[in-house]
Amino acid sequence: MKICVFLINPRIEELRGICNDLWSAGQDTISNTLAWGIAYLIHHPQIQAKMSDELQRAVDNDDEDEHQRTNGAKNQTVTVADRLKLPYTNAVICEIQRVANLAAFNVPRKLSRDVTIDGHLLKAGTVVCPQISAVLMDEKIFENPTQFCPERFLDENGKLKRVNELIPFSIGKRQCLGESLARMELFLFVANLFKQYKFSAGAKMSSLERKMGATIKCQNFTCHWYLLGTPTFAPRTFAPQTLAPRHLRRPAKSTFAPQTLAP
């Protein structure tokens, strides 16, 4: 169906399908990326601490009184305006997206013309599926690609650098429509979570084993979290699978109550 025909006379079934695609793609990917981020930062507490320290130092409230400054974490919310002040936090988010690699196989494409790739002729009309992981895990581009290393996205001055090969949203005319929104959401979620809270392993260390599906998920795990700056260690426990929208959640295997996400 040509797009102009659809826009003039859309069918309700098609509209429902598009709405479901937009909702699921926008929610499932963000929640999975956050779960991967928590899992990796539990494995790398020194990176988590460094990011938290940057957030505490860079996002400061001039009107905050001395009592708040010395007792408990700062309450100021990180906003998009703070983004340029947080190079390490942005580097951590880039590395989370690289190692999570949620859409490793991308979506199919049909060639509009003949093309030769690495000596192989592909005819027009051939369906191909670009493999994003071939780029994100290429050791010629990312040294020691299996290691979690945010510093690969920083220059010698500690500033965030552009790495064109970081393509979690694909590239070209048909790259992810929600890229700008997703980048903004990831920054706000990650920055505010790790500015206020510390995450540590639960009953056992989170697994980094990948589960294949429409998007690549991490294994379900529990972890402890507590408010930074509190005088005593008072951990709460939650399962990251509850970050997913309710209609996308898998049945929980533990007696977890979603309200424990609240402080």
Image (cartoon, rainbow, N blue to C red):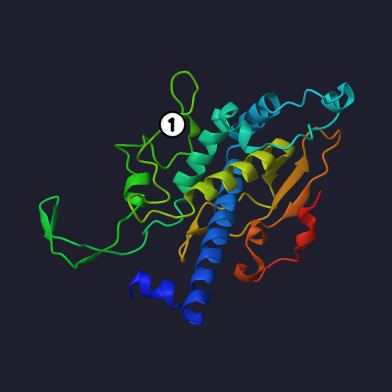
In front here: 254 or 51?
Answer: 51
In front here: 85 or 238?
Answer: 85
Judge whether residue 180 can be spotted in this image. yes
Looking at the rendered structure, the number of numbered marks drawn on it comes to 1
Q: Position of residue 5 (x, y in %)?
A: 37, 75
Q: Is residue 192 above or below residue 49?
A: below
Is the N terminus in the top left, top right, bottom left or bottom right quadrant?
Answer: bottom left
Report the residue at 42% width, 49% height from top: 168
Question: Which residue is outermost to the front?
Answer: 8
In front here: 176 or 256?
Answer: 176
Kind of element beneath mark 1: helix
* Mark 1 residue crowding within 10 angstroms, few (<14) / some (14–19) / many (20+): some
Q: Is residue 86 left or right of residue 226?
A: left
Q: Is residue 108 left or right of residue 230?
A: left
Judge whether residue 218 can be spotted in this image. no
Question: Which residue is outermost to the top?
Answer: 157
Q: Is residue 108 left or right of residue 18?
A: left
Report the residue at 62% width, 29% height from top: 50
Report the residue at 59% width, 50% height from top: 34
Q: Position of residue 183 (x, y in %)?
A: 53, 45
Type of amino acid at the residue the image marks with label 1: Arg
Q: Which residue is mark 1?
A: 152
Q: Quadrant of residue 85?
A: top right
Q: Position of residue 23 (x, y in %)?
A: 56, 65
Report the residue at 30% width, 57% height from top: 130
Q: Quadrant of residue 41?
A: top right
Q: Position of residue 155 (x, y in %)?
A: 44, 23
